[in-house]
Image (cartoon, grey):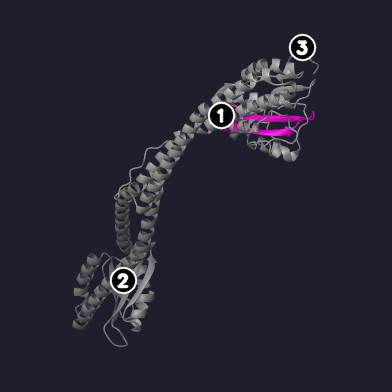
Amino acid sequence: MTRRLLLSYLSLAALVLLCLEIPLGYLYSRGERERVITVAEDEAESVSAYASLSLAAGRAERDLPGRVAHCAARIGGQVVVVDSVGAPIATSHQLTPDASRALASRPGIVAALRGTSTVDVRTSTIGGVQYLSVAVPVGHGTRPEGAVWLTLPTHVVHERVHHIWLLLALGGLAVLTAVTFAAFAIARWTGRPIRELERATNELASDSRAAPIAVTVTKGPPEVRSLAAAFNRTAARLAHLLDSQHAFAGEASHQLKTPLAALRLRLENLEPNVSARGRSSLTAAVTETDRLARMVEGLLAMARLEEHAAIPGPVDVGAVCAERHHTWTPLFAQQGVSLVLFAGGEGSVLALPGAIEQILDNLLSNALRASPPATTVTIELRPHTPSRRTLRDARARPSWVDLHVTDEGPGMTADQRARAFDRFWRAPGAPKGGTGLGLALVQRLAHASGGEASVRAAGTGGLDAVIRLPSALPAPGSHTLGRPGPRRREVPTRIGAGIRP
């Protein structure tokens, strides 16, 4: 912000200086040229008057050379006095015969000898040098006695004009320097509270806590002070809400889980005293109690996930998949379902601590409830391959690893898959025991890890739950984009002897 304000101030100051100095420079340049012409005209008039008196007294050849040389030395130019036919009478410099004969044909001298113009000012080039010439007639009347021709090199005028432009440029540079220091001080003063707001906002985004910003009546513009006050109120309210949520999560974890456990224990103790006719109702009550306990656990897990903003780190996804496969295999075997793991060498991914375990537990639990006996549930890791349209942008995108959990259950329609991640939503005809929070928690964990979650129709007729996570390793072969290496064939690990897949 400081740099932008400084550039804005300097641009405005430079624009004002240009609008002022350019017309002023042209005005001074024109004034200097007119001053030089005026001086030349005065000198020519003075020599003309002296020549007129000398000619009248008959002392032109004796007096005029000295006066002409003195005038030429004073103005730094050349002075020539000619008679009525254009022949030189007195000159301030040596003339060649050709130059002497050419005097009569000079436009300025011709105009002066005609008497049609009192003063004739011209710019001409003589010998490759540009001159400013002034011709003045000698004597009065319609037939002058001669003419005075005064030439002045224009480089004298140009030097004075350049000197004026140099002074204006130095003055403008001094003004810009002063404006730079003043603008920098103003920009720092204006941007200091904005930088404090940025610091506090970063703190609030990183750990949901931010130290209050000091707001005084003399610090920063009024709008910034008002913004700082509003930020302090927002941060305080957010801290209060987070404290309330933290207290709720802690209290609910204790206050809800204990009564549910006691209720289940009481229901189990009632089993010997319940008749055979009421056993089904007791079993349903125990099932609903377990479902309520799982729902509470899911809600508390989501509350803790929203409360603690952990930073994703590298996780060996292959090792996690193998460990959860080993844990869940006996449960799948009890239901007559085969659990298959295709574990490749995809390496590490970025995920929250414990996130992949929770994701797999929820997906495998859903797949087990939806899978009929003698079917297969597959866990597979695949590197994500970009499409041709995005292949050219692969260097700018992180590589991904896709975790697939595929079942052979009844599956879902397209409309049902669109609502699969909604909280408490369950598909019509879904098996009993679900809470409608598993996929919602899976999506939250995937997003918090920097990835995404989706459900698709599997080729086997069931569902294909896909968790896409960013790889913790650099994209292999990024320097040979478009030339993939040989594909390695993965050997499936199939556990569950005696179960027909």
Which residue has dot 2 on it? 34
Q: x, y (%) of residue 43?
A: 24, 73
Disc 2, disc 3: CB below 8 Å?
Answer: no
- Disc 3 to disc 1, C-alpha distance: 35 Å
Q: Which mark is residue 301?
A: 1
Q: Which comes sooner in the sequence, label 2 or label 1?
A: 2
Q: Secondary structure at mark 2?
A: helix
Q: Judge whether residue 449 is colored magenta.
A: yes
Q: x, y (%) of residue 176?
A: 33, 53
User: Which residue is found at the position 61% from the left and 22% from the top?
Assistant: 266
Classify residue 49 as left or right of residue 177.
left
Q: x, y (%) of residue 217?
A: 30, 50
Pointer 2 local density, CA inside 10 Å: few below 14, some 14–19, many at least 20: few
Q: Disc 2 marks which amino acid?
A: Glu
Classify residue 148 as left or right of residue 330.
left
- Disc 2 to disc 3, C-alpha distance: 112 Å
Q: Nearer the viewer, residue 408 or 257?
A: 257
Q: Which comes sooner in the sequence, label 2 or label 3?
A: 2
Q: Judge whether residue 380 is colored magenta.
A: no
User: Which residue is found at the position 32% from the left and 68% from the top?
Assistant: 33
Q: Which mark is residue 271?
A: none
Which residue has dot 3 on it? 497
Q: Which comes sooner in the sequence, label 3 or label 1?
A: 1
Q: Nearer the viewer, residue 356 or 488?
A: 356
Could you tell me if residue 355 is visible in this image? yes
Q: Disc 1 marks which amino acid?
A: Ala
Region in magenta: 446-473
User: Which residue is found at the position 60% from the left and 34% from the top?
Assistant: 397
